[in-house]
Image (cartoon, rainbow, N blue to C red):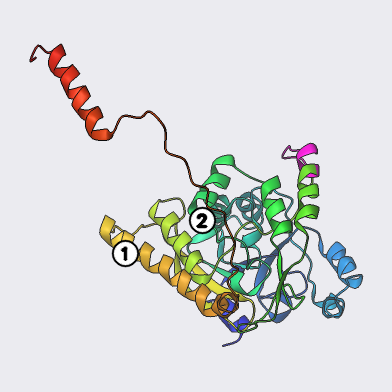
Amino acid sequence: MDRLEQLRRNIDKTSMSIIEIGPFFSPIAPRADGWDTTIVDFQDGDALREMARGHTAEVIRNKVDEIENVDIVWTGQPLDEAALAVRPDGFDCLIASHVIEHTPDLIRFLQQCSRLLKPDGIISLAVPDMRKCFDLLKSPTSLREILTAYREGRIRHSPEALFEGRCSAATRGGKSAWIKGDHSPLGYAHSLEAAWKEYQGDLKGDMSDSRPYVDNHAWFFTPAMFELAIFELNALKLVNFKIAFIEENIGSEFVVQLRRSDTHAALSNDALNAVRIKLALRHHAEFDAEVGPDYREIQPVKIEREIVKVPAARDTIPTRELVSLLATRIRRRVGLD
């Protein structure tokens, strides 16, 4: 099954209404092929085509004619409000390829997706696999970080998130993305010092929500860690989606389909934790299977450390004598001696 087949699974062209976010030059459900698709992007169609004509990548320049007109120019307004203004009865399916990792607030994004979908709606996502792209050397996304962004109501990436994006962007053989099994030499795309200087500039600049949006990967997943995040958020009743399927493909991504479900699994604490442990361990297995050969080839570095001897304190009372002395004082106080 190729990438398009994965992303279109369970989506019927003849009967389903679709909203696709950010298709640019490579739509998954193009109107030109007969799909009933509403397109969302950050610029209108003319601006996107003009940007593609001057793009450095030849593959994008060659696909200018495949860029379709945009129905909703998304400038940060609530996605569900903008979408339902176009189709008040909602959509059957939302498609987003390499979008969810850019959202500053993952929970609110999924909540807005839920509100614009019909009760049995689905989300079809292509998500970068952190093992096979420039996110490799970053820490996997945790529930703590997801909840922090939700509590803060982020609509812009924090200076710290931008710093991480710059200082920890990895390369393999000079590439920012690669296929499974590639063990070319690893490197960093930017220096730590340069990232620090930009971070200091961010802190001195406009920190309000009206500042210009700077794009960034905010979330880093393997398939198992993504599944764990959705499972835990569903268990906490913060999102009403469950995973229908999740699959890797031959590229640097995995494809996942979420199905809206307004019921939450009533699991015992033991059953809930069993699933959480299984997925957390699966993440480590996934990571080791792909990245293990790299760190197993690293030769250990021996570090000479000087052992400093701490001299014994002088004029101290031995422990046994100290206990005996304290016991004597206590007996005298209570009148036993």
- Residue on which the image places disc 1: 274
Asked if residue 13 shows in the view, the reply is: no
Q: Is residue 50 above or below residue 42?
A: below
Our reading of the magenta stretch's main secondary structure is: loop
Q: Residues within 10 Å of mark 2 (few under 14, many from 20)?
A: some
Residue 185 position in % (x across, y down):
70, 78
Query: What amino acid is labelled 2 in the image?
Result: Ser
The segment highlighted magenta reads 201-211
At a point 52% along the width and 48% down the height, the residue shown is: 308
| Residue 179: x %, y % from top left | 65, 82
Identified at 77% across, 75% down, the residue is: 174
Q: CA distance from mark 1 to mark 2?
A: 18 Å
How many marks are shown on the rendered structure? Answer: 2
236 or 53: nearer the viewer: 236
Quadrant, the C terminus: top left
Quarter of the view holding residue 290: bottom right
Comparing 259 with 316, the one in front is 316
On whether residue 209 falls in the magenta region, the answer is yes
Circle on res. 142: 2
Q: Is residue 180 visible?
A: yes
Left or right for 254, reference 264: right
**Residue type highlighted by circle 1:** Ala
